[in-house]
Amino acid sequence: MLKFLKQVTDYTKEAVQSAKYIGQGLAVTFDHMGRRPTTVQYPYEKLIPSERFRGRIHFEFDKCISCEVCVRVCPINLPVVDWEFNKATKKKKLNHYSIDFGVCIFCGNCVEYCPTNCLSMTEEYELATYDRHELNYDNVALGRLPVSVKNSDPMVQPLREFAYLPKGRFDPHDLPAGSRRAGQMPEDLLEGETKA
Amino acid sequence: MNLAEGVQLVSFLVLSAMMIGAALGVVLLSNIVYSAFLLALVFVSMSGMYILLNAGFVAAAQILVYVGAVNVLILFGIMLVNKRQDFLPVKNAWLGKAATAAVCLGLFALLSTMVLATPWAISDLMPIGDGAIVAIGKHFFTDYLLPFELASVLLLMAMIGAIVIARRDFLPDELLSSSELPPESEMLTLPERPRQAIAARK
Amino acid sequence: MSVGIDLQSSFIELLQGYGLTPGVAKVVWMPLPMVLIVGAVTVLALVSTWLERKVSAAAQQRIGPEYMGPFGLLVPVADVVKLLFKEDIMPAKTDPWLFSLAPLLVFIPIFLSFLIVPFGQNLLISDLNIGIFLWISLSSIAPIGLLMAGYASNNKYSLLGGLRAAAQSISYELPLALAVLAVVMMSNSLSTIDIVNQQSGYGILSWNIWRQPIGFVIFWIAALAECERMPFDLPEAEEELVAGYQTEYSAVKFMLFYAGSYANLVLSALMVAVLYLGGWGFPISVSAIAGWIGISETTPWLQVITASLGIVMMLFKAYLLLFVAILLRWTVPRVRIDQLLDLGWKFLLPVSLANLLLTAGLKLTFPVAFGG
């Protein structure tokens, strides 16, 4: 009899405990309802990419020396460097250069290793096309100036990412003009070093 | 005949036609799933009859028990063992069919004579209508107590049987070949892991 | 107990004032509440889909529908329009008859069950004597439709979904019915009107939730399982079964399933409100307030206010429960099929039986509080 009673009490305790846990979970979900939505209304609002954002690669044709370092450091040897040897000047002459962004993983190795800095990362990320072959950018497409989220389209409202908001702000909308992000900026750090 | 009586007559005719048609479909259709669904239709039209007889509670109970439970279980049974298999033509199949037809016709004849022989008289008692729930409850717990309890005991037995069949802990993957058939005494027992072994494991 | 307003008799009297015979006036009246309730149920189901979207979004820190109408209120309308104009695809090798019949079999019983939902003393379609029992028996037809859909789709996911749905609704019908039975035992009637009236004496204090807390929890869990809501949505578990029995459905037939599931959810919430939360009753008894102010209960404008307050209270309670159901959806993970059946047969059923026994005992001991 006592054993049976113990079983019953244990069972009740378990049921009450599980009910308590479900209640706690409900409280968490309910708490989330009061929080501010983190939605970015994409076509009308866009986040400003951070400084180290690795977007579409920009290429400066005239700086390139056709050394093919970018091809060697690329995990899949993606950049296509079409050059010929100019016998008169004894220099390589670059004819075409292309990167297929349908295959590129944006690791940034080519940008890192380029000896003449003719490759650079941009903050452009809207690369969608109707045909995947259109993602194969040639040197003209690679040399176009990147589109910035800021000041490019009056319909688009640029929004700062969370880390770039002033201290105590959580909402990127309606920031006061000239507000700075929390913490010291790189230039502040440099100034401080030169003073010391 | 006023409006209400006309509606009643039409509903009765429609329900009877539906019931007979569906019942014939249950028997005659070769697709067993159709038969099962038509059986539900038979039950539903039967509950419609109960409504016409002013027995709403019985009608709802009919739907709950027969359509909601019995028929769903039949469908379950059919769908869980749904082996698409063509019937092999059996020799002298007409014999079986003839026998079935004879039995069915005999039953039908018996029932019809019974129907014709009974002096049907419309009862002059008032239909109990909405008081049916109370009346049925009282009958269940007074003069029909024994059949009521016997029915529940029967259901309990069926349930325990189902549990015994369903709770097999061990089933051999392949059928035993004829040489290693179990001895005669264990022929009808279900293959099962010995109880002691299970108890020892715990 | 106030009789409240009687729309039927006043409408018929109005028509008779225009020179119609009583019979014709009654014939004119008869289809009105049915049409009204079908429209109202559709709107309620649509509102609950919108609520589901908005509350889900809020629980996940999103905004949810915003651009279609104010606060995205027109999204359900857009849904309906889209589903009406989509092509009605019938996949090859389906069973055309059963495939078309199944959504109707799921949809019609749910709409029929709204017959017995009372929004006021006389604001329901028919005060049937079997009342709540009709709902229980009608809701047992749905598994047939689900099995039919699963079988007719000729698709393994559909069949599994249909079988799971049927198993689930059979298992949870028992605790549901037992929880209802405990309430019925206290009110001595199956009629929804009587059940509400029995709770109406002292405002919020006389609601059944205080007398039947266990029954309330059991009923709500079982109702969620019957509606295949999130912790129990195994029949359409998208990770395993694509969409269960709805996998092959599109356009209008899919809409019937979709609207049916939301109408069922609203219906269950309304039933909880009727059975446990005092139905159309205001937390403070309206007649008591009228007594304090010193107005007769039969004053016409007071009756109108009481009736509209009743409808508002009913909807408020139902949508509050719906809100809880949506929160639960984003809180509780889906249970496995064995956990589901364990919960139904090994927990809810014994507990609801014990609850029934307890209610019977309390009814014998304290006939004043538990309906002698």
Image (spheres, coloured by chain):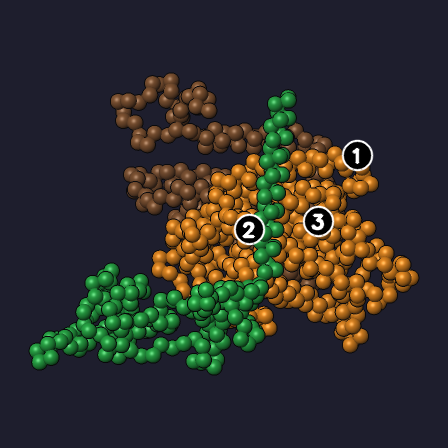
Chain colours: A green, B brown, C orange
Q: Quadrant of residue C246?
A: bottom left
Residues tagged 3 and 2 counted as in contact (Cβ below 8 A): no
The x and y percentages for residue C99 are 44, 58
* Image point (74%, 57%), residue name: C280
Which sits in the foreground, C23 or C342? C342
Residue A26 x %, y %: 60, 50
Question: From mark 3 to mark 2, how far is it between C-alphas?
Answer: 24 Å
In the image, residue B166 lies at what x, y percent? 45, 32
Dot 3 amino acid type: Tyr
Query: Residue at the spot x=78%, y=77% of the render?
Result: C18
Judge from the rendering whether residue A154 lies leftward or rightward of residue B179; answer left or right. right
Q: What amino acid type is highlighted by mark number 1?
A: Thr
Q: Is residue A31 above or below residue C347?
A: below
- Drawn side of residue C356 relative to residue B85, left or right: right
Q: Disc 2 designates what residue?
A: C331
Task: Say yes or no: labels 1 and 3 on the same chain.
Answer: yes
Q: Judge whether residue C320 can be spotted in this image.
A: yes
Q: Which residue is mark 1?
A: C365
Task: Please name the amino acid that badge 2 sits on.
Answer: Thr
> Quick check: A124 above or below B171?
below
Element assignment for label 3: helix
Label 3: chain? C
- Secondary structure beneath dot 2 equals loop
Give the mark, 1 or 3, whose residue is nearer the N terminus.
Answer: 3
Disc 2 and disc 1: Cα gap in Å? 40 Å
**What residue occupies the far front of the structure in this picture?**
A196
The residue that disc 3 covers is: C276
Which-is-in-front pick, marks 2 and 1? 2
Q: Nearer the viewer, residue C42 or A166?
A: A166
Neighbours of disc 2 within 10 Å: few (<14), some (14-19), many (20+): many
- Spatial separation of the CA atoms under disc 1 and disc 3: 21 Å
